[in-house]
Every structure is written in structure tokens, then in C-alpha cells.
């Protein structure tokens, strides 16, 4: 195997790894954001219930 072929395979592997890592990060951030929204809505409902009592 030549050096340029080896370096091309290594570069392609690193690119795939980077892209898959980005996808996982974006999905994780989406879940975190959804959880924060849910927590905020729950807190708002709790305050509303407390104010009505």
C-alpha cells in the first residue's frame, strides 16, 4: 500500500468519525433543549396552580 492511499483511507475514516460525532451532539442537544422546555412548562403549571389556591 502506498503512503498516499494509506493517508486517504485515514482521512476518510477521520471524516466519518467527525461527522458521526456531530450527529450525536446535535441529537443530544435537541434532547436537552426539549427537556428544558418541558421543565419550564411544568414549573409554569406549578406556579399557576399555586396562584389559584
Image (cartoon, rainbow, N blue to C red):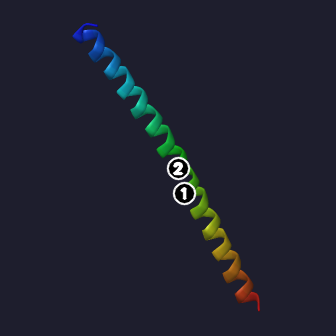
Foreground residue among 20 and 34: 20
Residue, far top: 2
On the image, the x and y values in percent for residue 44 come to 65, 75
Residue, far right: 53
Q: Residues within 10 Å of mark 1 (few under 14, many from 20)?
A: few
Residue, far left: 3
Left/right placement of residue 48 relative to residue 21 reads: right
Left/right placement of residue 36 relative to residue 14 reads: right
Residue, far bottom: 53
Per the rendering, the mark at residue 28 is 2
Marks 2/1: CA–CA distance: 6 Å
Foreground residue among 49 and 8: 8
On the image, the x and y values in percent for residue 22 come to 44, 39
Q: How many marks?
A: 2
Residue at mark 1: 32
Foreground residue among 28 and 13: 13
Residue, x 37% and y 20% (percent of image)? 12
Residue, x 47% and y 34% (percent of image)? 20
* Quarter of the N terminus within the rendering: top left
In which quarter of the view is residue 6 placed? Answer: top left
Residue, x 44% and y 39% (percent of image)? 21
Q: State whether residue 35 is above or below residue 48.
A: above
On the image, the x and y values in percent for residue 37 come to 60, 62
Q: Find numbered disc 1 in the image and state the secondary structure of the residue it sits on.
A: helix
Residues under numbered marks 2 and 1 in contact, where contact means CB atoms less than 8 Å apart: yes
On the image, the x and y values in percent for residue 11 come to 32, 22
Q: State whether residue 47 is above or below residue 33.
A: below
Q: Find numbered disc 2 in the image and state the secondary structure of the residue it sits on.
A: helix
Q: State whether residue 26 is above or below residue 11.
A: below
Residue, x 34% and y 17% (percent of image)? 9
Q: State whether residue 17 is above or below residue 51.
A: above
Amino acid at each position: 500500500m502506498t503512503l498516499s492511499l494509506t493517508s486517504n483511507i485515514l482521512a476518510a475514516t477521520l471524516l466519518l468519525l467527525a461527522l458521526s460525532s456531530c450527529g450525536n451532539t446535535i441529537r443530544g442537544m435537541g434532547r436537552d433543549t426539549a427537556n428544558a422546555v418541558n421543565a419550564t412548562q411544568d414549573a409554569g403549571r406549578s406556579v399557576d396552580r399555586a396562584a389559584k389556591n
